[in-house]
Amino acid sequence: MATPSTMQHRNASSFHAFVAAVLLGGIPLQGGSAPAPTDAVAAVAAAPADTSTRIQTLSLRDLGAQRPIELRGIDHSVYLPLSVRLDETVTRARLKLNYTFSPGLLADLSQLKVFVNDEVLATVPAVKGKLGSPQTIEIDLEPHFFTEYAQLRLQFIGHYTLDCEYPFHSSLWANISNQSSLEMTTQRLPLRNDLALLPAPFFDVRDGTRLKLPFVIAPSPSPEALRSAGVLASWFGALASYRGAQFPVSDALPAGHAVVMATNDQRPAGLDLPQVEAPTLKIVPHPSDPGAKLLLVLGRDAAQLKTATDALVLGQAALSGDQVQVDKLNYPARLAAHEAPNIVKTGGIVRLGSLVPNAAALQVAGAQLQTIRLPLRLPADTFAWQSEGLPIELRYRYTPPHELGAARLAVQINEQLVESFLLRPAGTQGTRSQRMVLPFLEIGGTYDRQDITVPAFQLGNNNELQFRFEIPPVDTSRCRETVLISQAGIDADSTIDLRNVEHYVTLPNLALFANSGFPFTKFADLAETALILSDAPAVAEIEAALNLLGQMGAATGIAGTRLQVLPASRVKEAADRDLLVIASGSAPAPLANWSQHLPARLDASRRSNTSLTRLSDAGSEWFSGALPRNFPDDEWAELQAKGPLTALMGFESPLNSGRSVVALQATEGASLQQAAATLLDPGKIRLIQGDLVLMRNEAFEAFRIGEVYQVGELRWWRWVWYQMRGHPLLMVLLVGLVSLLLALPLYRALRMRAERRVRSET
């Protein structure tokens, strides 16, 4: 799922973040004597320092520079957020810059400056003999400038003449590769055993890398215990968001921070855990890894374990001290379809200001204005076929250009142009302009309004609206001061109209599952989802399930507290839910009983004579726009290979029409874990389509084989038109029939009218 760009340029506000406040709820609790720390310094325990260190290398792309950095003009800076985990301190930092200076620069006057928190730590001069050629330099940075929330600033200062110069001359540029890297050596700091720090240190918002959090679970866990683990994984996945999350599973303590889930009769091996009589959350030191912590989620039985887990993820436990006990839990009402923090609610008019964390994200200032970017994540089943698009009432303000035609605003969706408008100079009256009494965003300038429509064919599930103001500086001629700073902003009360959005989709469609977890995330609390595992699930199956549930949490932004987990032998109990099946080995249940419904049969004990070319042909027919090709029962594929093979399959539930099954099956556990991990790779996700994806090591093949079905609701006339789309002859006959049915009464009415006129004349 895609990482948002966090790069900010010179005129952008500084990077801000904060640790979540202590959650207060109505849950009576016991224990917890340690006071909550008031800041990061107080969180550090008065314990012997841990000498364990780690070396981390982050590219500028990892820090938010999604493309190479282009710095232009006399003075141009770029800011990149650079945070340090709460439980770490930087002991060494080394920056490796890959850069190129313009060949037209004056070497004696041009340079690149490196700042951390606005402290100059290094200057890279332009070297005359190397201008225009790629260069690499390694710079040691003072580590004590790296604080919890820091900024790496790269400032280009360029000159091309000793005489008067135009500040935006074409020769004034420097390029920095986003593959440049920062290597940091960090030392772990001991933290207090305090639940008030949660989700840190298990997830730290300061850490922009992928979350890898081990789960320690007893051997042969019950479905109820696995349900609690799945809910907790979805919560951590929601916290990790764009970073992605992986949850290695074991029954023994790994190194580093970990989550331990146990009941009095189901406990991981080698751990001396206390007996509990109430749902309990506790944080303790790692017994064999100094500085690491264990989050203990405990209960007398599976029901209490569920209560402890849900109290944590719902924020209903007052977290303070090293331990809390939960006496009762009040569940919120079930969420409606498509109701999730990360998904724009359809059915109404949405303010653009509600799509960003604050109004500052809607304004830009500087010599070269950055693009204003707004996330627009629509439900995966948004119906766009022959839709008129999404109307936007856009209000914006800008520094007026010096002449008409010199400046414009380009509106884009996913980097595709929607519409472009000229920005009018001061003193002119646009056809749609209005006078505003109270200026918004306090930037002054000219105020305009435009009505635009985003075409439906440009919309996907995870969209980004982009507003690009282009206001060139005023060139006041040679040796005269040039106006450098412009300002522009989008009014937070601008709106996008989602009232006519309908929800209807053709399934199976594994692309929707890979990108947004659909159909399971249609209800963000997973109220209509059942996870089906084997009666004695292997560790690899549990780990794959937790990873997938973490991705669903990242898609919705909320924990799946209404998830149901069942063994394969009880799958019929989930007939009214969508099913996520994780299986490994030969002919696992329940897939072995559904063989006639599968797009392919994966058999680890037999070798098939069916050629994959045939499957590829079926896939190519689908992707070329042809209708899906159905195979007779005796021609369905049985797939087996020497070596690991994994299949991701989608099909209609054999238990209930209109319900869906997504199955991840592998010939062996290792390939199952690898397949679940690769679903975190945006490059691999783009390859997942159709109803069957075969994965062998790093190779992906997607096919369309089985029958399709539709879920959702449409207005009746649109439903009829949509069903006729693949049958043009039938559509012509239907139009003719409707025309005839309308013409007959009209003909009869006209004939009766003519007869009355004749009688009146006679």
Image: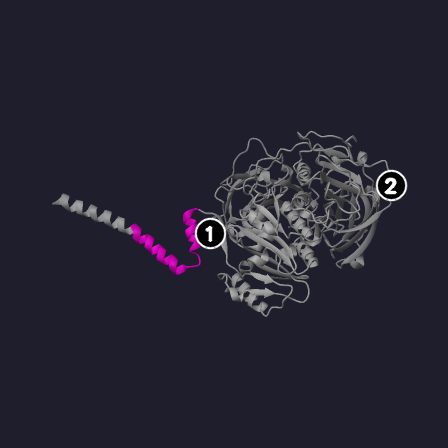
- Crowding at label 1, few (<14), some or many (≥20) Cα neighbours within 10 Å? few
Q: Does the rendering let one see residue 265?
A: yes
Which numbered disc covers residue 48?
A: none
Q: Where residue 496 sits in the image (x, y, percent)?
A: 53, 42
Left or right: 114, with 642 as reference point: right
In three-dimensional space, the C-alpha distance between marks 1 and 2, rounded to whole angstroms, equals 64 Å
Quarter occupied by residue 688: bottom right
Residue lying at the far left of the rendered structure: 762
| Magenta-highlighted residues | 715-742
Q: Which residue is mark 2?
A: 49
Dividing the image into 4 quarters, which one contains the C terminus?
top left
Quarter occupied by residue 606: bottom right
Q: Is residue 445 magenta?
A: no
Which residue type carries mark 2?
Ala
Main SS category, magenta section: helix
Residue lying at the far bottom of the rendered structure: 609
Q: Which residue is mark 1?
A: 386
Residue depicted at x 56% and y 56% = 650
Q: Of residues 31 and 377, which is closer to you in this image?
A: 31
- Crowding at label 2, few (<14), some or many (≥20) Cα neighbours within 10 Å? few
Which residue type carries mark 1?
Gln
Q: Is residue 740 magenta?
A: yes
Q: Work out whether mark 1 precedes mark 2 in sequence or the reverse, and give the earlier one.
A: 2
Residue depicted at x 78% and y 30% = 33
Q: Of residues 352 and 58, which is closer to you in this image?
A: 58
Q: Where residue 563 sits in the image (x, y, percent)?
A: 61, 44
